[in-house]
Amino acid sequence: MSKRFTDTNKYKKPFFRSLPGAYKLLWDYLYHECDHAGIWIKDFEIAQIYLGKDMPVTEEKALQYFNENQQRIIPVDSGKKWFLPSFIEFQYGDLNPNNRTHSSVISILQREGVKPLASPLQGRKDKDTDKDKDKDKDKESHLRGNPHSKIFTPPTFDDVTAYCAEIDFPGLDARYFIDRNTALGWVDKNGNKYRDWKAMIRTWKKYDTKKTSEIDKLFK
């Protein structure tokens, strides 16, 4: 037996209050009878049996009442099934493909050809997340090699290679430069954290005519 959330405020909502008694019962029935993706295999004969003979309902009237001012029922599979968007919104909120239950729901909706799979809010959240990622990348790029930044971000192999090409210093072994300073914790001979790795490379270039061991002494 599956368990589902129920809206304790539904009787306070104008939409639900305005429904005739039989269709209030039908709406509640749909929420319990649909699958976990909000899809109901349309069967008014069975629905009528559960609702009772004293609560007659028809498909035509149901669509008329339920979709007044807002599309709350979306026919799918050539009208053989009904999709209830509000079921998804209330039970799960925004669908997340990384959530196992949500991914199952998304798979069913895709199979049924239901779009969109997530609310506009989710789309905005995704865009905001992308913007945040871009900001982080820009921030990281800005911090690298910035002598005035309080946070030091070690350069990558490509960073070092590109800068060496920029200052015409092809003789520096970028991998050695990174591995050596990583092992030392990116600190100078006085134990102070470096803030500008580009300045380090310029210093190495200045002493390029000397042996590596002699260059190392400058930093030890």
Image: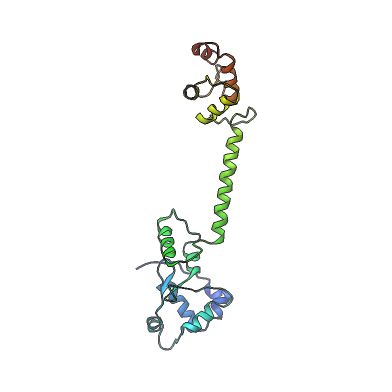
Look at the picture and state if 17 lies above or below 96. Answer: below
Q: Percent x, y for residue 215?
A: 53, 13
Location of residue 50 with respect to 168 vertically, above or below: below
Tell me if I can see residue 173 in this picture. yes
**Left or right: 33, with 161 as reference point:** left
Q: Position of residue 186 (x, y in %)?
A: 53, 24
Q: Is residue 49 left or right of residue 186?
A: left
Which residue of the protein is positioned furthest toward the bottom in this rendering?
Answer: 54
Q: Quadrant of the N terminus?
A: bottom left
What residue is shown at x 57% (from left), y 13% (from top)? 207
Viewer can see residue 156: no
Q: Quadrant of residue 106?
A: bottom left
x then y, percent, for residue 192: 57, 21
Give the number of marks: 0
- Residue visible at 58% across and 46% down in the picture: 132
Looking at the image, which residue sits at the far right? 148
User: In the figure, 133 relative to 196: above or below?
Assistant: below
Q: Seen from this angle, which residue lies furthest left?
A: 1
Question: Residue 198 at x, y = what percent?
Answer: 59, 25
